Amino acid sequence: MIKAFAGQHLLSVQELSLEAVETVFSVADRMVPFAERRMVTRVLEGAILGNMFFEPSTRTRVSFGCAFNLLGGEVRETIGMESSSLAKGESLEDTARVLSGYSDVIVMRHPEEGAVDRFAQASRVPVLNGGDGAREHPTQALLDLYTIRRERAALGLSLEGLRIALMGDLRYGRAVHSLVQLLNLYPAIEFHLISPPELALPPVYEEALRSRGHRVFRHDTLAPGLAAADIVYVTRTQEERFPSPEEAARYRGLFRLNQAVYTEHCAPQTVIMHPLPRDSRAGAQELDSDLDAHPALAIFRQADNGVVIRMALFALCLDVVGDVEKDLKPVRWYTGGRRP
Ligand code: NCD
């Protein structure tokens, strides 16, 4: 089962079976002592990650890099087209042929849908999709589902009977596109899709959910969807994907979750998630900072989970899962205050 990942690309969640997702999660659980800086492993000593980000990124880029470092490997980064030979007219395929000679695995984010697939076809090493345009963000979906399971487990619940509200820009949000496809592998989930009609989830994803027997409700106001959910997944308006800034501005601040809205409409303990970054500029604020101290706000636990999920994916695709716990060392430096 583990072998199915070795040497393989991860370009879309469509490549993942339920069994594969569960494998990633069980390997991720074994990564916690390293992410929490209790133990050190050097299993990827000598390996090189090519981290190629052609779109803005903080969490995804840095957590992929940290995950590789925590396994003992080195990271080489290329950030922005203007700093690579793509700016001189080099094709993605040539870049892939060259970069795969320098790296053992490559992570790529690109603004065009399908560009990471094209790159992967020409690459000699595994490529993990760090987000391609509005299409997919498979590793984000894995860390989101891992978070959902952990947050549910903390309340003594499984995924069974889950009711999730997805709120905001469901049209251009690639994290949502990948997450709903992953959730579609599990039985009997209730989906509440909250968005302006123009930013609704593309029909292909909604139809896939309905055809697997999930209950799907669409809302163009906040209250009914929030009231019906155990988890609210808030998203940012993906301004950079709109045809014009004026068009994006129409949706700015339309749906906002803050303490007052939460208290009025959400059941107690409703878990709040967001892939981040949240748009904290005045007028946007889809997830207000007045909820920051709320125990049900899972957004920073969610971001932390990105490290163990990405460690698991590297260990699986470079086929070292069996060796991760060999020759462990204790952490020698000050680690106080690291975990909440
Ligand atoms: C998301 C993305 O890039 O798609 N961010 C992330 O990777 N955590 C969501 C977003 O940018 O809104």
Image (spheres, grey):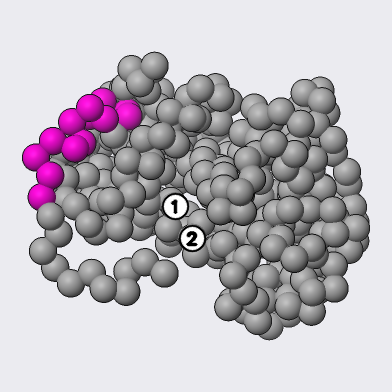
Q: Which residue is at 90% across, 52% downward?
A: 219
Q: How many residues crowd around disc 1 within 10 Å: few (fewer than 14), some, or many (20 or more)?
A: many
Q: Is residue 117 above or below residue 171?
A: above
Residue 320 painted magenta = yes
Q: Is residue 256 left or right of residue 340?
A: right
Q: Is residue 179 left or right of residue 48?
A: right
Q: Which residue is at 80% across, 31% downward?
A: 214
| Label 2: element kind | helix
Quadrant of the image occupied by residue 182 = top right
Residue named by callout 2: 301
Q: Residue furthest front?
A: 156
Residue 323 painted magenta = yes
Q: Which residue is at 79% across, 63% downward?
A: 267
Percent across and percent down for residue 252 are: 76, 70
Question: Label 2 amino acid?
Answer: Arg
| Label 1: element kind | helix
Q: Which residue is at 47% across, 54% downward?
A: 55
Q: Nearer the viewer, residue 229 or 171?
A: 229
Check if mark 1's residue and mark 2's residue have beta carbons within 8 Å: yes
Question: Label 1 amino acid?
Answer: Asn
Percent across and percent down for residue 105 are: 28, 35
Residue named by callout 1: 305
Q: Is residue 17 visible?
A: yes
Q: How many residues crowd around disc 2 within 10 Å: few (fewer than 14), some, or many (20 or more)?
A: some
How far, Cα to Cα, is label 1 from label 2?
6 Å
Q: Is residue 260 above or below residue 262?
A: below
Residue 103, disc? none
Q: Is residue 251 visible?
A: no
Magenta segment range?
A: 316-329
Q: Is residue 245 above or below residue 215?
A: below
